[in-house]
Image (spheres, rainbow, N blue to C red):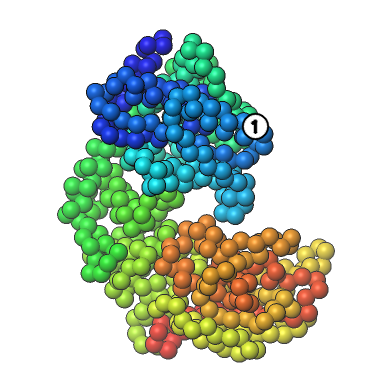
Amino acid sequence: MSRNLKERVRGAIAQNHMIREGDTVCVGCSGGADSTLLLVLLCEFREENAFGFPFSVTACHVNHHLRGAESDGDERFVRDLCGKLGVPIRCVGEDVRSRAERTGTGLEEAGREARLDAFRECLLSCGATKIALAHHVDDQAETVLYHLARGSALTGLSGMRPVSGNVIRPFLAVTHREICEELTAREILWRTDSSNESDRFARNRIRHGLIPELERSVHGGAARHITETAELVRMADDFIGAEARERAKKYVAPACKKHAVCIADDLISEPEIIRRRVLMDCLCRLAGGRKDIGRVHIESLLELFGRERGKGIDLPYGIRAVREEDRVVLAGPGAETPASVRHVPPGPAKGRFMPAEPAGNGLIPAVTGRAEPVRITGSGTYRFEEAVIEVEIKKRAELCADMPRDRAGGLCVPQKTYTKWLNYDKIKKGLLIRNRLPGDYLTLDADGNKQKLKNYFVNCKIGRDIRDRVILLADESHVYWAVGGRISADAKIGPDTERVIRIKVNYTDGNGGSGTNG
């Protein structure tokens, strides 16, 4: 068994050209069974000149500081192992819990991002050319099932690739059981992460419950069969991708300005699988990645081809799609695009009302860029670029007299997207209508927990170009309302509120007409 596993791993590395002459391979080593064996085998391949050329091995360990002494014990173990193997080690400490709170993500995602950051640093500044990760058959099956359950295109169902850029995965044909048996036969110790036993995370529930049940009730080789099918899906996905890129040459062309593409109506004549892939590729190219772009966005784009001229939709990362006479134009963040693709479309005639369609997630940008701040000095009408903002400041009893009440007698403040009622008593220095500035933040809850405005925009998938133009109502660095998005918890009307400010945002077509967003 020992020789068989080692030879299979060596064969996988050679077949997929994972390592080339002169490479410095950095192993992401947690101290667990999988990464421990990967580090050991790569060191043996290096010493044995297994591929007929020299390469180097180094290691990176990320201490998440989630399990106290246990996490520190993992770091000591990896340091000792690297010392015995003669491998340079880079250890990175990251408070993952604080990172999760700061970014508004879960612990699992925050830990993953921390590791990716550490690996990128190895590539950028530590001389590494490849990152080796110890994902195996069980991890692959878990990933495919996770994507399948949540909804995925072929790319997601193909799972993790043996080679993905600078990342290599030599263990994708090896099971976790085989890894543990190999280590036991060699009398090599490893660490066990107690958090992997918890079913708090969805992936752990798949790993501990679903996959074992499939192997008990359906077939003992279920995990391996899933990974083999994922490999077939990957080959099919690669073929379709290549075919779509070739056919796209007939339908997709750069727009007349940068960061935008035009997609001809004739694309609809292609088979649906090609249509979808071409649209996905265009979206990903403008977004700079595939994360958070899914089936619903492709469906919306396909529907747009059948709508009348001038109709538009907003997509993740600040991308906007607009229907023109015989094409759809996709404009990414920072696009210099024709007037029809601007986030506030022009009216069909001078003076005619044309309400703006909001940028992604409802947040509204000023049209032409950052504008000079406007100070609210009292009730009245204020103009900020293409926005006309009606402000009314009155006593709570007057301004909220018609609002319904709940059983406890509290106000039921209407939840309108572009009209808000805020607690004016909380305003300290005076409200400004402006775009964002460094240090801006929102208050998340009654306990005073804060979130940087930048992180809020990131979580809302708002492109960088749009972030600088979103209209804000702010008191110094405290943002009370990102127009079209959330209000600060401090801005909410409470039982002790004496004065209320009602703010209603209207948009014009740039020619003097106005339209109202409720």
* Residue at x 48%, y 28% (from the top left corner): 82
Picture quarter with the C terminus: bottom right
Name the kind of residue labelled 1 in the image. Glu
Q: Does 262 sit above or below residue 433?
A: above
* Quadrant in which residue 334 is drawn: bottom left
Query: For residue 489, what is the image quadrant?
Result: bottom right
Which one is nearer the viewer's eye here, 86 or 383? Answer: 86
Residue farthest right in this picture: 408
Question: Nearest the camera: 504 or 163?
Answer: 163
Q: In the rendering, at what x and y percent does residue 136 appear? A: 43, 26
**Residue closest to the far left:** 250
Tell me, yes or no, if residue 137 can be seen here.
no
Dot 1: few (<14), some (14–19), or many (≥20) neighbours within 10 Å? some
Coordinates of residue 47 in the picture (x, y in percent):
34, 21
Residue 113 appears in the picture as rendered: yes
| Left or right of 310 in this view: 412 | right
- Would you say 438 lies left or right of 278 here? right
